[in-house]
Amino acid sequence: MLLLQFSTSHYCRKARLVLGYKGINYQVENLTPGLHILKVKPLTGLTTLPVLLPQIEGQPQAIGDSTQVLKFLESYQPEPSLFFSNPEQQTEALMLEDWLDESIGTATRFVYYHFRAGEGKNINPSLSSQIVIGVVRKQYGINNASVELATKRLTIALEELSKRWRSSEYLVGDHLSVADIAAAALLSPLALIPQYRQGYPWLFERIVKIHQLCGEALPPGL
Ligand SMILES: N[C@@H](CCC(=O)N[C@@H](CS)C(=O)NCC(=O)O)C(=O)O
């Protein structure tokens, strides 16, 4: 299988965690932001990464969107499963995953790129890095007002995750699921931001543990 990705994207990290957890052999191709559209849009009709090319006869040519990649991998190789046979747990895990994808992954992006353009500028002060950060901020409308809203969303999200992850190893049920994978990947950029590292040590302990279970390299800062 071939994973088309941006090496630094937290949504692409989510796909890699699933591939790793299931022990599937794959290769990655790192695409250049902007130019990636020329390759990706004809394949999926979308402009976003990750995109998985199974390269297996009888399987789809390309799968876009990390949630669809996860669902494909779950049906392609059901064990070890990231789903539940119990319908209530399955619904809860899928709802958490969707919320993490659609709301919290985006809020993380806002807070992270705001940090990288300000306090965290010296992580990579090079002109090329600052240009990329500027383009991302413009593309997604990242400014003081939108970052303030994103910060509030993250605070509520971390309260909810704290209740679950501090009383159990897993967000839902008694094994690793789509919800844990989504949270570990989509909150991982916060590891570089000192306020989060100091304020939520339990979060980064869980992120490290899940990366270890999936055989995936730790995110920057951990
Ligand atoms: N819901 C999508 C979101 C993926 C996403 O936002 N990917 C970003 C990188 S982190 C992207 O490809 N952005 C480029 C673009 O939108 O053109 C998923 O889960 O795959």
Image (spheres, rainbow, N blue to C red):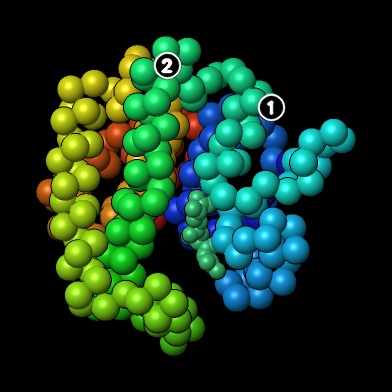
Q: Which mark is residue 217?
A: none
Residue 212 vertical placement versus 60 (above, below)? above
State the SS at label 1: helix
Q: Nearest the camera: 92 or 117?
A: 92
> Which badge, 1 or 2, comes first in the chain's sequence?
1
Label 1, label 2: how far apart the Cα atoms are: 20 Å
Asked whether mark 1 and ligand 1 are closer than 8 Å, the reply comes as no
Q: Residue 92's x, y, as percent?
A: 35, 27
Quadrant location, the N terminus: top right
* Three-letter amino acid code of the residue under disc 2: Pro
State the SS at label 2: helix
**Image side of residue 153 versus residue 116, left or right:** left
| Label 1: few (<14), some (14–19) or many (≥20) C-alpha neighbours in 10 Å | few
| Label 2: few (<14), some (14–19) or many (≥20) C-alpha neighbours in 10 Å | few
Q: Residue 82's x, y, as percent?
A: 49, 24
x 77%, y 41%: residue: 60
The answer to which quarter of the image holds residue 112 is bottom left
Question: Which residue has dot 1 on it?
Answer: 76
x 56%, y 36%: residue: 70
The answer to which quarter of the image holds residue 44 is bottom right
* Three-letter amino acid code of the residue under disc 1: Tyr
Residue 155 vertical placement versus 78 (above, below)? below
Q: Nearest the camera: 52 or 214?
A: 52
Q: Is residue 23 visible?
A: no
> Which residue sits furthest right?
57
Q: How many marks?
A: 2
Question: Which residue has dot 2 on it?
Answer: 87
x 37%, y 19%: residue: 89
Q: Residue 222's x, y, as percent?
A: 33, 48
Asked whether mark 2 and ligand 1 are closer than 8 Å, the reply comes as no
